Amino acid sequence: MQHGPHRFLCEGADGSGKSTLCSALAQRLEHAGYSVINLHAGYRFKKQGIFTYHTAILDTAIRSGADVVVLDRHWISEVVYGPTCRGGSRWPLIGRFMDRILLRCGVTYVRCQPPIDVCAVTVAGRRKDELYPDSARAVYNAYTDFYDGLSGYKPLSTMIYDRSQDSAEKMAETLV
């Protein structure tokens, strides 16, 4: 295992395994003796405050002093969910701005994207007000478009996690 700070950003549609992976990653690294901060940066915020919110989450992560920072969602969620589910907040420069900072901090992007049916089954067992099935396909496709570069910007390097193929614990082992 490397020494020094580890930083991870896990992104994907609801039910894709992000939170499970973040927990497994945090547990593995805490067990190895690292201090870990695991932050969940949701996407359900008002248009006006989303940029400030994501900047504050990033500031908290950087200033935490933890050996490991695990971000469960961040700016990519806003790029996907904003236009897909709320008809806006499109921040044309948020991707480049956040990506440059995160890359300077040595972030590893993790694309959580199992088949859409896997996501749908997981979310079906949750609250009744979740996105599925109404806008699930649009969100799922928006993540695919984002990672394929079809939305105008994408992170430079990304690890892929498909929870239908590997357990969160196995992926956590791969990441560290």
Image (spheres, grey):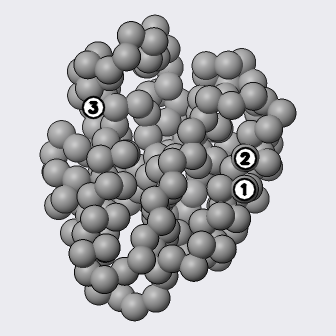
Q: CA distance from mark 2 to mark 1?
A: 5 Å
Percent position of residue 111, x then y: 41, 50
Quadrant containing the N terminus in the rendered view: bottom left
Q: In front of the other: label 2 or label 3?
A: 2
- In the image, taking residue 132 as reference, residue 64 lies left or right, namely right
Identify residue type, mark 2: Tyr
Q: Quickly name the residue at label 2.
A: 53
Can residue 129 be seen by looking at this rendering?
A: yes
Between disc 3 and disc 1, the foreground one is 1
Compare residues 7 and 118 and report the one nearer the observer: 7
Label 2–label 1 contact, CB within 8 A = yes
Residue at 27% x, 31% y: name it: 115
Contact (CB < 8 A) between labels 2 and 3? no
| Residue at 51%, 55% in the rendered image | 39
Which label is found at residue 56? 1
Determine which residue is flagged by label 3.
Answer: 115
Please state which amino acid type lies under the numbered disc 1.
Ala
